[in-house]
Image: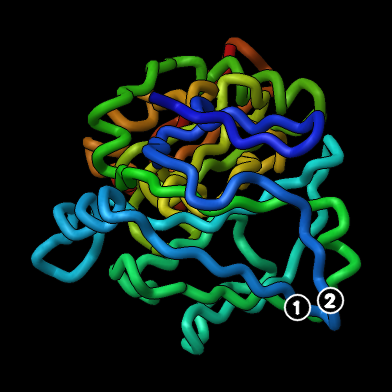
């Protein structure tokens, strides 16, 4: 069962996030109240949650079920301001990237004992930004990117040429290049992906995107920064099929003379490149 975390008139529906499923609320949603730039939260875990956490511990030491600390903008701002959090659990500092993500997992720092009171200290060098934020602590079941892709397969599309033509027409350009290389890993993109609500032909790697997005409650297209959801994502099957043939660079041309075809053996075009003429 999915649970909605609420603060005042702001609701965040966890159905939008396939990366986790809530099992129980540990500390209900509440607004930050930092004093002297820090806030102390304490909680003890009941036995049924401890048993669930222990049962889900993996051989590598990771946890299938996790204690999730989550923050969200509770003022319905269209763009959530960046936050900078420092978190300490039971006197152990937690690594938190900056700007901070909306989700931090703290299970590894907590004592799984009924009689122990876990202490979380939250501070921020920019505490004024947190005035628009709320937080809660939950027990969740995590799903990893590869599991999400298998469990929630995406729709496919073959509209690459149409999108490229739209960009070339709007900008009056006659040449567009798409690279099948992931900017993060510098490897060939395996699952070329974009959002169905975006209008650009450029793509990003699905698994790389999900690895970063699993710690965020507000997703943005890494290309145009438009707000998106998992259900908006589609796989570009045209580019995927081309990539499976060993082609990693795609040139889209809008020729000046529509009756003249471009020569695929022009200088500079190799077997790893594909020249695509738009009619």
**Can I make out residue 239 in this image?**
yes
User: Looking at the rendered structure, which numbered label has been put on residue 38?
Assistant: 1
- How far across and down, in percent of the image, does residue 50 sit? 27, 58
- How far across and down, in percent of the image, does residue 149 sit? 30, 33
Seen as rendered, the residue at the extreme bottom is: 91
- Looking at the rendered structure, the secondary structure element under dot 1 is strand
**Can I make out residue 267 in this image?**
no
- How far across and down, in percent of the image, does residue 114 sit? 32, 65
Instruction: Residue 265: name its quadrant.
Output: top left
- Label 1 crowd bin: few (<14), some (14–19), many (20+), radius 10 Å: some
Q: Which residue is mark 2?
A: 35
Decide: is 138 above or below 13: below
- Label 2 crowd bin: few (<14), some (14–19), many (20+), radius 10 Å: few
The residue lying toward the viewer, choosing from 67 and 124, is: 67
Seen as rendered, the residue at the extreme right is: 128
The residue lying toward the viewer, choosing from 63 and 240, is: 63
Seen as rendered, the residue at the extreme left is: 59
Q: Is residue 50 left or right of residue 255?
A: left
């Amino acid at each position: 069962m999915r649970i909605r975390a609420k603060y005042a008139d702001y609701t965040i529906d966890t159905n939008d996030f396939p990366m986790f499923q809530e099992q129980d609320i540990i500390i209900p949603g509440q607004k930050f109240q930092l004093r002297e730039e820090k806030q102390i939260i304490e909680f003890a875990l009941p036995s049924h949650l401890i048993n669930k956490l222990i049962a889900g511990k993996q051989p590598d030491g990771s946890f299938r079920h996790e204690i999730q600390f989550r923050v969200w903008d509770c003022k319905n701002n269209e763009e959530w301001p960046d936050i900078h959090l420092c978190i300490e659990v039971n006197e152990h500092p937690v690594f938190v990237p900056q700007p901070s993500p909306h989700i931090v997992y703290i299970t590894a720092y907590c004592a799984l004992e009924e009689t122990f009171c876990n202490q979380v200290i939250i501070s921020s060098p920019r505490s004024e930004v947190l005035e628009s934020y709320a937080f809660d602590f939950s027990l969740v079941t995590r799903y990893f990117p590869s599991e999400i892709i298998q469990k929630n397969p995406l729709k496919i599309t073959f509209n690459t040429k149409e999108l490229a033509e739209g960009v070339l027409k709007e900008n009056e350009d006659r040449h567009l290049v798409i690279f099948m290389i992931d900017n993060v890993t510098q490897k060939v993109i395996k699952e070329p992906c974009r959002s169905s609500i975006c209008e650009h032909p450029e793509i990003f790697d699905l698994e790389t995107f999900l690895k970063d997005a699993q710690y965020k409650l507000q997703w943005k297209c890494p290309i145009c920064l438009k707000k998106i959801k998992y259900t908006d994502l589609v796989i570009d099957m045209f580019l995927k099929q081309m990539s499976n043939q060993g082609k990693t660079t795609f040139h889209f041309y809008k020729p000046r003379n529509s009756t003249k075809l471009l020569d695929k053996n022009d200088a500079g075009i190799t077997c790893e490149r594909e020249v695509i003429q738009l009619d």
